[in-house]
């Protein structure tokens, strides 16, 4: 039994020794080290997060309480259609419209649909800079060769940071309310449901509540809107690419990096909103969603190292990275993180071996 234990100890010792390279085995021809591991803090800048406007199946809300958009009948017939509160109204008849509250927006006496718009648009549809985003990064570099004083090789890095957008939105003031005439002749019930959303493609087998795309009049009304939105995402990143370095005297070194970048984004979004228009409070609106997606793109950067000792360096760097835009559905809204123009600042320590 003791003899067996001794043999196992020798085998383990040989295994450990086999994993450790002989002295000088990982040295370059000029005496430098071929491997380097770096641990850094990583601050993300110019990353933007936003919630979009409400999106029914047929398009986007162009009013705070509904929408009026062209339908397939207008498109197939080549008919002009546009609604522009500041300009002209080509008009047309459309089935692609909707509202939130028939008790307030369906004026049956005058046979008109009431829709309200704000000069600044939807208060909850806003974009904001996420600010300075703290994160961490672990990278490994392997030298592949030299050319004069230049060194070149490959690097791989893993990083992590979190984006959190959590804010309340409120608006109290005036708005413009537009009146769109309707007939609804020949439609069963003659009145749309309490909350109605028409579609782009007309279904001739069902009720088609058509309205005029040209409002008959408009008037100012008081509006009060209160809402909140929250968007939280964990972002795990990967960078792979070549590097090129050159000494700056005896104690410093500059290196240039670039290559492929990717990220796994795990995002969670939620929002809620209540509005009171012309003294009538509409039904509360809300939505939530969670999902994961993989983004990819590229990065370029520059790093500066200060040699503290033969093996240890202090490092600072800056990177530009384009990973595109991550989108997360949250009911009838979409939350986004724009990482297409991001800047990352790193500071850390590295060990050569």
Image (spheres, rainbow, N blue to C red):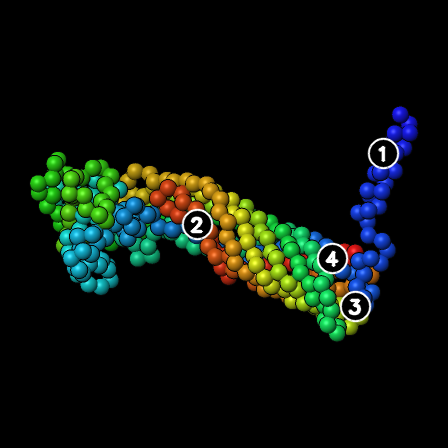
Where residue 320 appears, as percent x and y from the top left, is 56, 63
Judged from the image, the secondary structure of the residue bearing numbered disc 4 is: strand
Residue closest to the eye, 31 or 94: 31
Mark pair 3, 2: CA separation: 45 Å
Which is closer to the viewer, label 1 or label 2? 1
Residue closest to the eye, 198 or 11: 11
Judged from the image, the secondary structure of the residue bearing numbered disc 3 is: loop
Mark pair 4, 3: CA separation: 17 Å
Which is closer to the viewer, label 4 or label 3? 4
Q: Earlier in the sequence, mark 2 or mark 4?
A: 4
Mark pair 1, 2: CA separation: 55 Å
- Residue pointed to by mark 3: 251
- Residue pointed to by mark 1: 8
Q: Earlier in the sequence, mark 1 or mark 3?
A: 1
Quadrant of the rendering where the C terminus is positioned: bottom right
Say few, some or many: other residues with alpha carbon within 10 Å of mark 1 (under 14 / 14 to 19 / 20 or more): few
Which is closer to the viewer, label 2 or label 4? 4
Query: From the viewer's perspective, is residue 234 above or below residue 256?
Result: above
State yes or no: discs 2 and 4 in contact (Cβ < 8 Å): no
Q: Earlier in the sequence, mark 1 or mark 2?
A: 1
Quadrant of the rendering where the N terminus is positioned: top right
Q: Is residue 161 shown left or right of residue 115?
A: right
Mark pair 4, 1: CA separation: 33 Å
Quadrant position of residue 285 = top left
Q: Earlier in the sequence, mark 4 or mark 3?
A: 4
Where residue 275 appears, as percent x and y from the top left, is 32, 43
Is any atom of residue 103 visible in this view?
Answer: no
- Residue pointed to by mark 2: 327
Where residue 66 appears, as percent x and y from the top left, is 26, 47
Which is closer to the viewer, label 4 or label 1? 1
- Residue pointed to by mark 4: 36
Mark pair 2, 4: CA separation: 36 Å
């Amino acid at each position: 039994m003791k003899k067996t234990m001794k043999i196992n100890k020798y085998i383990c010792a040989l295994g450990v020794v086999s994993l450790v390279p002989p002295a000088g085995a990982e040295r370059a021809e000029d005496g430098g080290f071929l491997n380097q591991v770096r641990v850094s803090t990583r601050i993300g800048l110019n990353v933007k997060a936003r919630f979009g406007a409400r999106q029914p199946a047929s398009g986007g809300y162009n009013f705070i309480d509904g929408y009026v958009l062209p339908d397939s009948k207008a498109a197939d017939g080549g008919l002009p259609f546009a609604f522009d509160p500041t300009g002209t109204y080509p008009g047309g008849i459309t089935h692609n419209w909707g509202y939130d509250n028939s008790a307030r927006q369906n004026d049956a006496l005058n046979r008109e649909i009431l829709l309200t718009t704000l000069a600044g648009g939807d208060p909850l549809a806003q974009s904001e800079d996420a600010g300075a985003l703290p994160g961490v990064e672990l990278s490994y570099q392997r030298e592949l060769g030299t050319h004069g004083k230049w060194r070149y090789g490959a690097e791989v890095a893993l990083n992590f940071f979190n984006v959190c957008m959590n804010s309340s939105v409120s608006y109290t003031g005036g708005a413009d309310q537009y009146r769109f005439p309707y007939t609804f002749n020949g439609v069963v019930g003659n009145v749309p449901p309490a909350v109605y959303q028409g579609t782009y493609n007309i279904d001739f087998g069902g009720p088609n509540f058509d309205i005029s795309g040209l409002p008959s009049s408009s008037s100012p009304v008081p509006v009060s809107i209160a809402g909140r939105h929250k968007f939280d995402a964990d972002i795990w990143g990967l960078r792979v690419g070549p590097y090129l370095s050159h000494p700056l005297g005896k104690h410093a070194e500059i290196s240039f990096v670039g290559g492929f970048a990717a990220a796994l984004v795990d995002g969670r979004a939620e929002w809620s909103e209540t509005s009171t228009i012309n003294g009538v409070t509409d039904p509360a609106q809300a939505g939530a969603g969670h999902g994961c997606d993989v983004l990819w793109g590229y990065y370029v950067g520059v790093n500066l190292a200060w040699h503290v000792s033969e093996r240890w360096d202090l490092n600072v760097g800056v990177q530009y990275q384009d990973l595109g835009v991550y989108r997360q559905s949250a009911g009838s809204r979409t939350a986004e993180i724009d990482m297409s123009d991001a800047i990352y600042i790193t500071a850390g320590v590295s060990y050569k071996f």
